[in-house]
Amino acid sequence: GMVQGINNCKGDDISDSNIGQQSSPSVMTIELNEWNLANGKSPLVHIPIPESVATNDPIALEEFLSKSENEIRSLQSIKAEQIMQQERYFALDATPAFVLASGRAVQGMLASGVADYLEFKAVEGLYWLEMNKDDENNVELSRVPCSKNDVFGTKLLAPMDKRRLMKFIQVSMDYATKLSVAEELQESEIGDDSLPDSEVQSLNERHLNQGRSLARPQNKAVATDELNVLQQFIQKGNMTFDDFLSQKYKLSPKLRSIVRYALAWETEASSTSLADGMSSLCRHLQALGRYGTTAFLFPMYGSGELSQAFCRSAAVFGATYLLRRAPLAIQCKNKKEGDNDSDMAVQGILLSGYKAVDGSYEGGQKTHRKDQDKNKIVKCSQVVVPINAIAGSKTSNNVQHVVRRISVLSGKVIPPESGEQRHVIFIPPQTDGNTHAIHGVLLDSSVSVAPQGCTLLHLTTTALVENGGNDSTEVLDKAVSLLERMGKGILQSITFSSGEQPVELYHVSFSHECPLQFETKPSPSGLYACGHMGHCLTADAAFEKAQEIFTSICPGMEFLGLSNTFDETIRERAEEKRYDDDEKMMLESALGMIDKPSASSGGTATLPTTTTETPEHTE
């Protein structure tokens, strides 16, 4: 037989009454549920254990039992070991990021051809987690409405809140469409800042997607008065997003939290400005229903494929990668002799000597040239670096840290109709003492980031370390404990049938500083710093920052667009390949014509062997 469980572990036939029982403070009793004696009962195994592990900690208890002569292991540890044997099927993103179905990222990948190197799948659903403050075990996970049917069918909102939400969302979508039309007119160099009424009335023709019912019912009149009021409040700039939702649309506190944190992606307890809140909300609404029920796309094999795809595309067009040399410093010089240090320009990058990734040499021997041991300077006039690579970039005593926890779970967390786990979970601030929102991401083998039967749970939040980081350890430890409690709360929020409850097999927690872009202004000209995305769900912000830097370096040039020379070269090569294949196509066509009579006669025909001589040079 097999031991079905130890202490707090649960299996198919395990109950709290027969597992983890202790006949004395130093003896644990385990019931072997798959064994039956003549009296119909299962045998009991009594194992002496020291008082130091005679607690409710299953990990400490299992470590002791596995090292003892009994060699007793739980099903959880056995299954975890089997799963880790498939480690090559795991792809754990240190910074998981989605792509909006219609945004800067998608436009850039299509224009540059990088989309040819990538595959995406749509996120299945968005969820909202609520915790009862009086009872921490009472956790509820509800689906965030992303369509008209979801709004009127959800139990998350009261009937009056549903009507108010629909009214606000329709006005927001009209405002988003108005801004997109104005941007199109500006790009087409019409130059008219005032949007004609005819353009506003054509909103129905611009919502032919799956999410149209959420945006606006067909042929519904545009509320121009509501749009004007919204624009006036934005222009004044004296109202927060939360105040606008409360005063203008009378949304309840619960509904305001859903709009702010699940639809507009706010992360802090204090609300952003009305302009910033509406900007995030409009981006979300415009991407709804493009390729699925949500606005998010996730790349196959993890979000790390985004950078790899751009690297592949850059290599095709002549980019150079210098490996095994670490950047040490940026070399600068004065623009003019006698100038002070504030008027400097980038001259090059100082690179370290040749070394392997781990700092050693391959095979333990130096097989390269001696000159590769020396530092090297690469001449350049423009340098793009991460902001945390610049010494002295911190100008504030308060430092933000992004705290993450990655869990490997057995089974499914949310049992959807499709059976695939691609979901986003929003946990608002003050749910369990958290000062910032928590984002949860569920992914499984459907996007090739985990083996079959496993689900990855990414939890992310922000922790603010004040007073120069003197209490950083305590703050970060609290944030890690918070994510651990939220992970358990997510698992408790779903009701499963017997044997389907997911179990955490492994987890890892880490944090890193997140200096903001406005904290530093590099003095040397030609030096550009990229800030970290921070606590952000999508990668669109990185594309926007890249476009800003590209415009500064190459003014007047198209961002992520193929040049006409490369485009013509690709077309010429395609035509040459087509001409080279003409002879092959003719031969295949002749063989096809011969196959047709033989197939229609119902018999079997054998083609004679034909030898074709091809000249060495063919014009």
Image (tube, grey):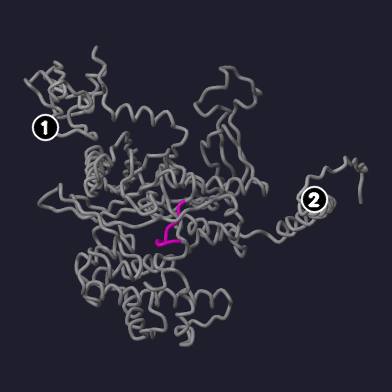
Query: Can see residue 481?
Result: yes
**459 relative to 618 in the view: left or right:** left
Q: What residue type is labelled 1?
A: Ser
The image quadrant where one finds the N terminus is: top left
Q: Is 324 contained in the magenta span?
A: no
In the displayed structure image, the side of residue 482 where residue 25 appears, left or right: left
Calculate the distance from the C-alpha at mark 1 to the C-alpha at mark 2: 75 Å
Circle 1 packing at 10 Å, graded few (<14), some (14-19), many (20+), is few
Task: Tell me the SS state at disc 2.
Answer: helix
* Residue 561 found in image quarter: bottom right
- Is residue 231 shown left or right of residue 560? left
Instruction: Where is residue 299? Give x, y as percent.
Output: 48, 50
- Give the SS element for disc 1: loop
Quarter where residue 224 is shown: bottom left
Residue extent of the magenta highlight: 292-298
The amino acid pointed to by label 2 is Ser
Q: Position of residue 165 (x, y in %)?
A: 28, 72
Task: Relative to 284, say whether 410 is above or below.
Answer: above
In the image, what residue occupies the spot 60% across and 53% down?
Answer: 116
Q: Which of marks 1 and 2 is nearer the N terminus?
A: 1
Mark 2 surroundings within 10 Å by alpha-carbon count, few (fewer than 14), some (14 through 19), many (20 or more): few
- Residue 339: tell me if it is visible: no
Disc marking residue 616: none
Residue closest to the far bottom: 197
Q: Pointer 2: what residue?
A: 598
Of residues 614 and 279, which is closer to you in this image?
A: 614
Q: Can residue 295 be found in the magenta stretch?
A: yes
Which label number is shown at residue 17?
1
Q: Of all residues shown, which one is farthest toward the left?
A: 24
Question: Is residue 229 or residue 219 the one in the foreground?
Answer: 219
Residue 217: image location, x then y, percent: 38, 79
Tell me where residue 248 appears, x and y as whole percent.
Answer: 24, 77
